[in-house]
Amino acid sequence: MSRMEETENNLLEKNKLKTDTGQDASYYSSNPSDLSIGSSRNHHNISNNEKTDNTILVAEHYNTMEEKCLSQRDQSRIVYMRNFNNWIKSMLIDEYVNKIKQNKNRNSPLKVLDMCCGKGGDLLKWKKKEIRHLVCADIAEVSIEQCKNRYNDIVNKSSKVRGFTPIFTAEFIAADCTKVRLREKYKDVTIQFDLVSCQFAFHYSFESLTQAECMLRNASECLRPGGYFIGTIPDAYDLASRWQKCDGNKFGNDIYSVEFICKDKTNPPLFGTKYNFHLEGVVNCPEFLVHLPTLCKLASKFGLELVMFERFETYYERMKNEGKSLLYKMQAMETYPPYYESPLLGKPSQDYQHAISHMQNQPGHRKIGTLSQPEWEVISLYAVFAFQKKEID
């Protein structure tokens, strides 16, 4: 067994049964990842019109999403969960940038590709890590324009600070990363990235084999050997487990809902297992399950080896001590019991029983940081991943 296969099997075995619902997700994780033409798996033939419609829906959703100010975001029912997700991204970026810097010369320039960058929510993270150059790519033209404007604002504000040190240079590409070869759009086609990041978006590529391959090619093609491809995706094992358990094809709570369009619960296709995901005020568009063994097999084709795959709650437990001050700074947890002037965002009588139990078992804690139970249910749907580009023999 190769090192990649052993790592993949260990990671899959470690994570495949960790479902928030306590259900057995092995029916999905144990299905073979056979990409050959003769595979017995149903590859779900999707019409060109349906593919086009899905792409348009995703682009339109993010193009029309209103840019909200901080005060508006603070009024959201899921503001703490959104901040928590942002903390997860911050810790993931910090962890792998630090790994890269440990193996590079101190003054070596750090270059990053941010695929599906959205409106530039991670720009300040890249600034903090003192990278040298950033390429931002996204399917939504409006988002790319907003990202560019946000970058220019950061540059202008930084230039007014005494002792100003120029921040990273940047370029912006409006393109579908699942269908367009990004290398052909770079200012420097010979560029080598140290890190590629794709946050909360890679799952859109699993609409088809062709799109998944295109996405992985973009992640790997200009990534230097030893560099990392990191990201966050919905955990297909947990999604499939909840889907199998529910009556019909729809499940959720008062802040999110998932409705599967695919009707075959027992043998979902490797690509095109479509579901509509709605999250209050944030997401409302079609997504696709990412079958992890298939992802690992495809990634290997492009020289990428899986080195980390963890559920959000597992990653939180591993990183919470290191990131404790950042959790507080980013307001990524809700205070329980609340301060008098800050009422709970969830339902006090039913959404915080886990917090009450924790405090009863840990006497002496007058207040703790937590999320409401509905928010934890959404958090548990997601996982972080990291692939490393294989060194050339």
Image (cartoon, rainbow, N blue to C red):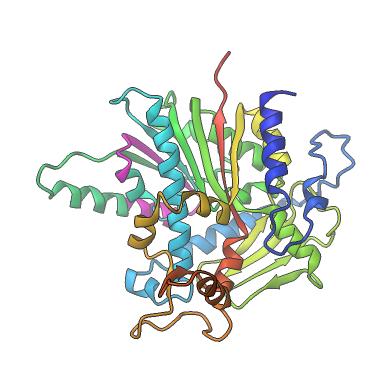
Residue 367 at x, y percent in the picture: 41, 73
**Whether residue 254 can be seen here:** yes
Q: Which residues are magenta?
A: 128-148
The answer to whether one can see residue 53 in this image is: no
Left or right relative to 141: residue 245 = right
Q: Nearer the viewer, residue 137 or 324?
A: 324
Q: Position of residue 291 (x, y in %)?
A: 72, 46
The quadrant of the image that shows the N terminus is: top right
**Residue 48 at what x, y percent from top left?**
72, 50
Point out the residue furthest to the left here.
162
The relative height of residue 110 versus residue 383 in the rendered view (above or below) is above
- Could you tell me which residue is drawn at 41 percent across and 25 percent down? 103
Q: Nearer the viewer, residue 286 or 13?
A: 13
Q: Residue at x 36, y 31 (%)?
A: 110
Q: Can residue 131 be found in the magenta stretch? A: yes
- Residue depicted at 87% across the width and 38% down the height: 39
